Image (cartoon, rainbow, N blue to C red):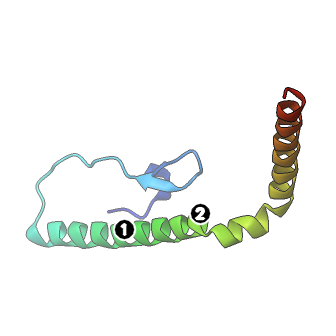
Amino acid sequence: MSDDKSDVYVSGAGEPVARPARVPQERTAAQIREDIESTRVELSNTVGTLRGRVNELTDWRAQVREHKRELVIGAAVAGFVVGGLMALRRRGR
């Protein structure tokens, strides 16, 4: 396989996703083994990258640290909404 990155399909986030399929041709057993090993290494790297990304996105403590301001604003809005609803309910009695 070529190491040319221009033939790699990328996701909307710019992460490499796949390479286009190669046209079947006469290849030796050694070339097939080399392609299999190259694909295995690529898959291993991709799985490692995905695992790191999943860990990063599912780490709720890091998400709270990074989005503390948004969480505080959301909690304040929710508090006002719940307080307003309780006041309306009491007034209706």
Amino acid carrying label 1: it is Glu
Camera-nearest residue between 38 and 2: 38
Q: Position of residue 9 (x, y in %)?
A: 45, 48
Residue 2 in the figure: left or right of residue 26:
right
- Image mark for residue 57: 2
Amino acid carrying label 2: it is Leu
Q: Position of residue 19 (x, y in %)?
A: 37, 52
Looking at the image, which residue is at 21% across and 68% down? 36
Mark 1 — residue? 42
Residue 80 in the figure: left or right of residue 49:
right
- Using a 10 Å C-alpha cutoff, classify the residue at mark 1 as few (fewer than 14 neighbours), some (14 to 19) or many (20 or more): few
Looking at the image, which residue is at 89% across and 36% down? 87
With respect to residue 51, does 22 lie above or below?
above
Looking at the image, which residue is at 16% across and 71% down? 33
Q: Where is residue 32 in the image (x, y as percent from the top left)?
A: 16, 66
If the image is split into quadrants, where does the C terminus sit? top right
